[in-house]
Image: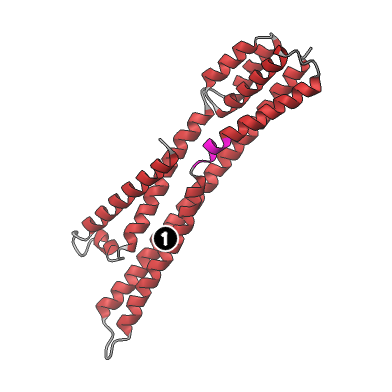
Amino acid sequence: MKQGLFTALLIIVTFAVSFAFYVWMGTTPEDSTFHAVYKGGPIVAVLMALILMVIAYIFERLIALNKAAGKGRIPEFVKELKQDVDTGEIDQAIMRCDDHQSSVAAVLRAVFQRYQGLETHQITDRDKKIMEMEKAVEEATTMEMPLLEQNLIAISTIASISTMVGLFGTTLGMIRAFMAMATSGAPDAVQLSLGISEALFNTALGILGGIMGIVTYNVFTSRVDRFTYMIDEAAFYIIQTLGAHSK
């Protein structure tokens, strides 16, 4: 599924679910927690939609990054590739990369293919071979990084938006509260309490969405950084091994 279509569907589904849930909360008994949240106003539904979007992105990123990790541990995989290089079985190494199906394997596959191309053209300069293989790593990494970093900007954006939307809801609640206090005679206690509860619920949900977004962004950014480090380390190791076997 294309990224734009996924995002559009996610927005539609999360907002539809959130507003439906918000309407349902309005039908619950007045002394229930759900009805108290309902009194936070329609901004609550928007905040719930943003929180649902973060949760959806968490599952999407977990699936994507687990897939990018491939089958089996990376250190053992790289050792097997070195053994193939030592025995001159480059085709076998490429097959291992295809079977592993990880981002590291995709980059190393590009290295092996570039090495085979250099061997076919009978390039004997070791430094030139290493330079060409390093270029292959850069090109393959450029292709892999968007897949690893996908939706991280969206998560970061939601973290910021959630806080701002929560602040907006808080402001609306405080406006209602001050309007209740501004009435002539005794303040309208009901409207005053509604305004305060609206402000507090929006504040709480906005902070919750912001925290979830920030934590999620940092966790997945850290995982992507580890992927990048593994790619660089494995590529350097394999390139040096191939360079040592160059004629």
Colouring of the image: secondary structure
Tag 1: amino acid: Gly
Vertical placement of residue 20 versus 164, above or below: above
Closer-to-camera residue (219/143): 143
**What residue is at 32 percent from the left and 86 percent from the top?**
182
From where the camera sits, is residue 211 visible?
no
Circle 1 is placed at which residue position?
Answer: 206
Please identify the residue farthest to the bottom as the structure is shown: 185
**What residue is at 69 percent from the left and 8 percent from the top?**
87
Q: Which residues are magenta?
A: 145-150
Q: What secondary structure is the stretch in magenta mostly built from?
A: helix
**What residue is at 32 percent from the left and 84 percent from the top?**
181
Picture quadrant where residue 188 is located: bottom left
Specify whether 95 is left or right of 32. right
* Magenta stretch encompasses residue 233: no
The image shows residue 203 at horizontal and vertical percentages of 40, 65
Specify whether 183 is left or right of 144. left
